Amino acid sequence: MGVAGLTGLVEERGAFFTELRVRDTRLVIDGSSLYHRLCFASAADFRRGGDYGLFSAAVGDFFGSLRACRVSAFVVLDGGRGADDRKLPTLRGRAGERLRAAHGLSRGEGGGLVPLLTREAFVQALGRLGVPFVQCFAEADREIAGLANRWGCPVLSLDSDFCVFDLAAGYCPLSHFQWRSVRPGDGAQGPYVPARCFWVEKFCRHFSHPNSSLLPLFAAMSGNDYVDTAALEAFFGKVRWPRREGKHGRLRGLLRWLAQFSEPSEALDHVLTYLKKHQRQEMRALLCASMEDYTPSDVKLEDFFQNGRYECEAARKAGLPQWVLDALAKDPTVLRAEDDSIAYNEFLKWKEKKLQNEDFDLDAAHSFCQWQCSLQMALHLNQLLGTPLSEPDLSSLYTGTLVHRLYQELKSTPSVENLFSLSPKMTQLYQVLLNTVESAVSPDFFQKMTKTKSESCKKKKASSKKKKAIRCAIPETQHLCSVNRFASLGVDE
């Protein structure tokens, strides 16, 4: 997300920030940035598909800290990509990065990967906590900036695009928002969250810019989610920056070069003179469209928080009926599972139990990943149909560590029914699920599975070298992800 390298540039100098005590205020929150941040802060087991219970608990702790400081939080989430699909190349690149990260996790390498249902679990958690939130029709950045400016409150995000927007009350990066370290109040003032706030005026002053009007062109030329800097290499190859610029030299040099112009249009005209004539018209259109993305939107999201509906020009142009727009803004009712303390305590024992075989079962991981994909598509279909069914509570539905340990337990136990003997509810649920599966397959299905199990083991051993070569070649087959989302999950027998 954001402008390539800009976060590193602004972090180099503390002078662009001021210390901020966040309390007794509204706060507009970039939902996508927040759930990514909380996901990696929740100690989830990424290798086994995540732990939505721990993640939901982290969401609760975060908003608990804000309420303790009397901060009124309003969460804004991204919507669709838009009909023009300008971000498609960027999304393809990120899909490739996720494939490589998943491949690394399957081999025991470090790193993290946001579990498939994190966004859905986040939205459900917001609903349970009573936190006001809205999903925009398309990208949310402009709507976030517009809402924050009309309310005169800060933006909380981890997207360097907000270093470019002209925000009335500044931008608070999540990396400097110490919500786990709420400080007590002093005197008449209550507790607060220590934070740092970025001010675009200080940034412009440092680079001799009279105002922030040239920053959108700077962001577009530096490379963001919509513009590939490779198209501007002719410009960067001919313009020389001072050698003393050091780290982030291109960004610093471009900022200082742009400072000589008073208006974006004048600067853009000069940039285009460095390109070939047949490239200029297309590049002008691309840069102008990208610059427009840094203009705060006049869409009044506050209307949604007051009456549950807001007007959006992009949505009107799409020609969608109002009931679809309302459903998009509001991502549905959640069905809370009936508590069973006996079963829950048994599950906790399995989760904490030390297994004889701690090896990572890649085949099981693929199966559980496919199950999550199927559930995600079912949730989307349910929403598309106007949510005729309540959604299952994801915070209690899937815990990666637990399901993998339960899988190992089920493989070794002589009788599956014995695992649920202490809980009549779980025994009944198991029997319903078993009957459902048995009714969908032939009577001898499980006998065939047992008979072929030993043959499958032999084939796996024989193909281990082949499988290793296939796994190493996964990055070369990234293009398949745009055709079949399960392509990378295939397991050769």
Image: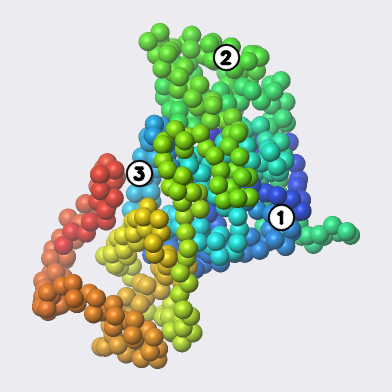
Nearer to us in this view, 1 or 9: 1
Whether residue 48 sits left or right of residue 220 in the image: it is left
Image disc number at residue 71? 1
Whether residue 145 sits left or right of residue 103 in the image: it is right
Q: Which residue is mark 2?
A: 265
Q: N-terminal of the two: label 1 or label 2?
A: 1
Instruction: Where is residue 4? Give x, y as percent.
Output: 51, 34
Above or below, 97 relative to 131? above
- Residue ID at (88%, 59%): 188
Whether residue 134 sits left or right of residue 319 in the image: it is right
- Residue ID at (45%, 19%): 285
| Callout 3 secondary element | helix
Which amino acid, by three-letter code, is at mark 1? Val
Image quarter in which the C terminus is found: bottom left
Task: Give the alpha-carbon distance from disc 1 to disc 2, as whole Å.
Answer: 40 Å
Image disc number at residue 155? none
Residue furthest out toward the right? 187
Quadrant in which residue 71 is drawn: bottom right
Kindly tell me whether residue 229 is visible in this rendering. Answer: yes
Q: Which residue is mark 3?
A: 96
Instruction: Where is residue 423? Give x, y as percent.
Output: 40, 89
Kindly tell me whether residue 206 is visible in this rendering. Answer: no
Which amino acid, by three-letter code, is at mark 2? Ser
Which amino acid, by three-letter code, is at mark 3? Gly
Instruction: Where is residue 429? Give x, y as percent.
Output: 34, 81
Q: N-terminal of the two: label 2 or label 3?
A: 3
